[in-house]
């Protein structure tokens, strides 16, 4: 037994530092995702649906995510908006001939309380104009979701651009 331990120990020392760091980070992050409630997991799937509707310019699908009593403050509006104006920004991009090429969601936090889930995340997105030009932009988004008989819907939210410094 005393000969096995030193060989195993020497093997551990040969593991690249990057792998060790990756394993440490992974073991730190996994419990956070494991602790998500079922409600949070469902809502994060809806956040992805949100961006898939945007990418497909599916205004009806997109509108289905929003509660009738929604009020929020999107980055494109000088004042809070209600559900009747929630697709204005997508229509404005569409009317200019600009399309969402790709996006990535980076969750920051979420919290479930009874029939409400609040999500916070960064979204990086690339919109291309008619000439195929564009540059990625990142925004911060907060959504408050409420569980209704028809499923999870956004009842409040806010977004803000992250400006390059």
Image (cartoon, rainbow, N blue to C red):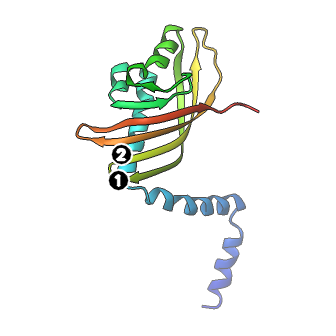
Of residues 155 and 30, the one nearer the viewer is: 155
Crowdedness near tag 2: few (<14), some (14–19) or many (≥20) residues, C-alpha within 10 Å: some
Q: What separation in Å lies between label 2 and label 1 (alpha carbons)? A: 6 Å
The answer to which of 115 and 93 lies nearer the viewer is 115
Image quadrant occupied by the C terminus: top right
Quadrant of residue 60 in the image? top left
Q: Position of residue 54 (x, y in %)?
A: 44, 24
Q: Nearer the viewer, residue 163 or 53?
A: 163
* Element class at badge 2: helix
Residue pictured at 54% horizontal, 41% vertical:
121
Figure quadrant of residue 6 = bottom right
Q: Which mark is residue 38?
A: 1
Residue 116 shown left or right of residue 81 in the figure: left
Residue 104 in sight in this render: yes
- In the displayed image of the protein, which residue is found farthest to the front? 79
Lateral position of residue 73 relative to residue 164, left or right: left
Residue placed farthest to the bottom in the image?
2
Residue drawn at (56%, 26%), measured in percent from left and top? 75
Structural crowding at the residue carrying mark 1, measured as other residues with C-alpha within 10 Å and reported as few (<14), some (14–19) or many (≥20): few
Q: Is residue 144 above or below residue 99?
A: below
As helix, strand or loop, the secondary structure at mark 1 comes to helix
Horizontal side of 138 relative to 54 (left or right) equals right
State which quarter of the image contains the N terminus: bottom right
Q: Is residue 67 visible?
A: no
In the image, what residue occupies the spot 30% across and 43% down?
147
Observer-nearest of 74 and 22: 74
What residue would you read off at disc 2? 42
Q: Residue 91: x percent and y percent? A: 46, 14
Position in image of residue 36 (x %, y %)? 42, 56
Do tag 2 and tag 1 residues touch (Cβ < 8 Å)? yes
Residue found at the far left of this picture: 149
């Amino acid at each position: 037994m005393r000969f096995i331990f030193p060989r195993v120990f020497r093997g551990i020392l040969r593991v690249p530092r990057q792998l060790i760091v990756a394993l440490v980070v992974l073991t730190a992050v996994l419990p956070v995702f494991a602790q998500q409630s079922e409600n949070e997991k469902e809502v994060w799937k809806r956040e992805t649906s949100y961006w898939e509707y945007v990418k497909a310019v599916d205004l009806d699908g997109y509108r289905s995510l929003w509660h009738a009593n929604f009020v929020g403050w999107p980055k494109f509006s000088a004042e809070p908006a209600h559900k009747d104006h929630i697709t204005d920004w997508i229509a404005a991009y569409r009317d200019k001939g600009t399309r969402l090429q790709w996006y990535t969601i980076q969750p920051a936090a979420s919290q479930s309380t009874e029939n409400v889930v609040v999500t916070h995340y960064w979204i990086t997105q690339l919109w291309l104009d008619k000439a195929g030009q564009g540059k990625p932009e990142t925004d911060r988004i907060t959504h408050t979701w409420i569980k209704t008989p028809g499923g999870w819907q956004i009842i409040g939210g806010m977004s803000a651009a992250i400006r390059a410094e």
